[in-house]
Image (spheres, rainbow, N blue to C red):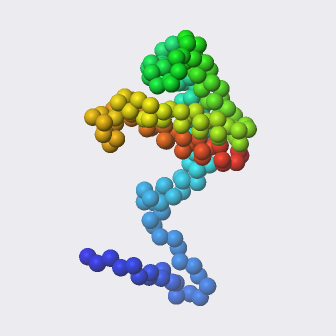
């Protein structure tokens, strides 16, 4: 079988001025997706905004109530001694950031604050690399390393929702 990059014009009707009906491919899975995509696109940004905000609120509440599995990691990475107040305060800040994301207000201010917060999570990679990398190999992430590196996705989502105009 040979694949050609040549464009072959669609067959035309013998009657002058008549149009060729659309191909039957629109009933294929790809055709159905093409019809569904604009509807998904319309709701996608709101879903991303709500999802990111929900994650921030959820993780923040866990820190506030003392049930966050990341609390010990936060304290271990800090370059200063943290009192008992630090993790719950960080939790409240995350709740506020999550609500801020959902609201879509003051995006110009939200982006640097959220970016600084998420970049702060990357401190583990620099300040305590033994917690993030197995055998001192930067390609072998530990569970903690994976937990931190996934924040790249959160950061990308934050950039999208804070720089996209609110509908």
Q: Give the percent coordinates (x, y) of residue 35.
A: 54, 57
The one of 139 and 52 positioned closer to us in this rendering: 139
The one of 85 and 107 positioned closer to us in this rendering: 85
Q: Can you name the residue that lies furthest to the right here?
A: 106
Q: Give the percent coordinates (x, y) of residue 83.
A: 55, 13
Relative height, residue 43 to residue 148 (above, below):
below
Q: Give the percent coordinates (x, y) of residue 9.
A: 48, 82
Total tally of numbered discs in the picture: 0
Q: Which residue is drawn at 45% across and 67% down?
A: 24
The one of 61 and 152 positioned closer to us in this rendering: 152
Relative height, residue 37 to residue 58 (above, below):
below
Q: Residue at x 67, y 32 (%)?
A: 100
Q: In which quarter of the image is residue 65?
A: top right
Q: Which residue is drawn at 35% across and 30% down?
A: 130
Q: Which residue is drawn at 54% across and 41% down?
A: 155
Relative height, residue 113 to residue 66 (above, below):
below
In this rendering, would 102 be left or right of 23? right
In this rendering, would 152 be left or right of 108? left
Relative height, residue 35 to residue 3 (above, below):
above
Specify whether residue 64 is in view.
no
């Amino acid at each position: 079988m040979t694949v050609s990059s040549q464009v072959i014009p669609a067959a035309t009707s013998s009657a002058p001025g008549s149009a060729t009906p659309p191909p039957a491919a629109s009933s294929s899975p790809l055709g159905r997706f093409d019809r569904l995509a604009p509807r998904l696109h319309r709701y996608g940004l709101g879903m991303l905004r709500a999802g990111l905000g929900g994650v921030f609120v959820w993780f923040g509440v866990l820190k506030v109530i003392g049930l966050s599995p990341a609390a010990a990691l936060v304290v271990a990475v800090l370059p200063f001694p943290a009192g008992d107040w630090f993790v719950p305060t960080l939790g409240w800040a995350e709740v506020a950031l999550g609500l801020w994301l959902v609201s879509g207000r003051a995006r110009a201010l939200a982006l640097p604050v959220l970016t600084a917060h998420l970049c702060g999570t990357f401190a583990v990679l620099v300040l305590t690399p033994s917690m993030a990398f197995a055998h001192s190999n930067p390609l072998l992430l530990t569970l903690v390393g994976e937990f931190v590196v996934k924040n790249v996705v959160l950061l990308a989502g934050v950039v999208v929702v804070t720089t996209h105009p609110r509908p």
